[in-house]
Image (tube, rainbow, N blue to C red):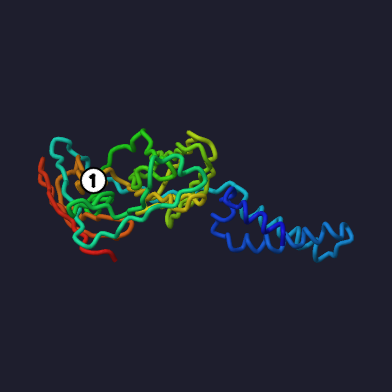
């Protein structure tokens, strides 16, 4: 059992294994293969066929489950139906506030390690529910029903940047268009990895060992939300909303949001929060008008 134990002791350097969806099976391969390799060292080529077979099967299993095999691109989503052209002279604004009236969960101090503590000036707290005067920060707000009838502008050429700095994601919540570049950045002088958890877009797991390393990915399908996390530092979590139109926003530290360039009409509005879930509303936008609304969470689920 020495070999698998030694590997488990240093496994935080190998997130392709324990960060895999098949980590439970990889563990069994390491246990069986490590024991068989040790027996092979004792017996040499005189080892039984069973021992040699276990070594070969375990090695093949580990390589098969962790190697970066080329992945075929998923089928392209059905193109967005052609909509009516947006008249820039009539567009309006949807703006408002996201509120939380329940009891705010207390922040949790993070136990930083592995050099992360050296990148911070003091204690770091995990507090997904950030509230000031009943106003909620980091809520993702997007228009839904009603957007499909409009032609959308081209995808921005500027990438959305998801930065790993001080062993936390900054900011924590992002929004990106379908087909827009999303660039993951490692601003720390230490090893991170980025593993996404996704139901619609293909998931990926990329290692980022170098400071200032940048890796760019593109999400081809709308999804609310894609989670990005670091397996080396498990408190590091970010969420990315992938939207097929430009009408979305993220609430600021006063709970405010503002969505500009909205064509006249009636729209559904969805607010998503990583802990509190979703609330919905409606927005009626007059030509050159401003639709104001307040969306309220009342308690932690």
Q: Residue at x 14, y 46 (%)?
A: 264
Q: In this view, does 154 lie above or below 53?
A: above
Q: Nearer the viewer, residue 90 or 268?
A: 268
Residue that extends furthest to the front in the rendered view of this protein: 122
Image location of residue 144, percent across then percent down = 25, 53
> Quarter-wise, where is residue 84 in the image?
top left
Q: Residue at x 47, y 36 (%)?
A: 214
Q: Residue at x 27, y 52 (%)?
A: 130
Q: Which of 301 and 133 is in front in this view?
A: 133
Image location of residue 289, percent across then percent down = 10, 43
Q: Which of 275 and 127 is in front in this view?
A: 127
Q: Which of 87 and 167 is in front in this view?
A: 167
Q: Residues within 10 Å of mark 1 (few under 14, many from 20)?
A: some
Q: Is residue 38 above or below residue 191?
A: below
> Quarter-wise, where is residue 299 in the image?
bottom left
Residue 58 appears in the rendering = yes
Left or right: 39 in relation to 218: right
Residue 142 appears in the rendering = no
Left or right: 168 in relation to 12: left
The quarter in which the N terminus is drawn is: bottom right
Query: Secondary structure under badge 1?
Result: loop
Q: How many labels does the image show?
A: 1
- Residue located beneath label 1 in the image: 253
Q: In this view, does 277 lie above or below 161?
A: below
Q: Which residue is drawn at 87% across and 57% down?
A: 44
Image location of residue 281, percent across then percent down = 18, 58
The quarter in which the C terminus is drawn is: bottom left
Image location of residue 259, percent across then percent down = 21, 43
């Amino acid at each position: 059992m020495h070999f698998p134990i030694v590997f488990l002791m240093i496994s935080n350097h190998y997130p392709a294994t324990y960060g895999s969806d098949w980590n439970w099976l990889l563990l069994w391969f390491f246990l069986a293969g490590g024991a068989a390799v040790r027996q092979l060292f004792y017996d040499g080529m005189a080892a039984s066929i069973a021992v040699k077979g276990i070594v070969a099967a375990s090695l093949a299993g580990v390589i098969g489950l962790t190697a970066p095999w080329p992945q075929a691109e998923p089928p392209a989503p059905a193109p967005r139906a052609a909509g009516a052209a947006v008249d820039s002279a009539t567009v309006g604004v949807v703006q408002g506030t996201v509120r939380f009236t329940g009891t705010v969960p207390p922040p949790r101090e993070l136990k930083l390690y592995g050099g992360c503590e050296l990148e911070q000036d003091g204690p770091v707290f995990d507090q997904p529910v950030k509230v000031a005067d009943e106003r909620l920060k980091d809520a993702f707000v997007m228009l839904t029903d009603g957007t499909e009838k409009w032609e959308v502008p081209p995808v921005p050429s500027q990438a959305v940047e998801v930065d790993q700095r001080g062993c936390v994601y900054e900011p924590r919540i992002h929004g990106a268009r379908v087909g827009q570049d999303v660039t993951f950045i490692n601003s720390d002088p230490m090893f991170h990895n980025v593993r996404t958890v996704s139901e619609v877009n293909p998931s990926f797991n990329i290692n980022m060992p170098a400071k200032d390393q940048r890796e760019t990915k593109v999400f081809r399908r709308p999804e609310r939300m894609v989670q990005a996390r670091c397996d080396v530092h498990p408190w590091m979590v970010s969420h990315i909303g992938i939207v097929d139109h430009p009408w979305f926003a993220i609430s600021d530290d006063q709970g405010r949001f503002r969505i500009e360039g909205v064509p006249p009409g009636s729209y559904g509005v969805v607010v998503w929060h990583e802990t509190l879930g979703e609330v919905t509303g409606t927005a009626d936008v007059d030509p050159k008008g401003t639709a104001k609304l307040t969306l309220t969470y009342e308690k932690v689920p």
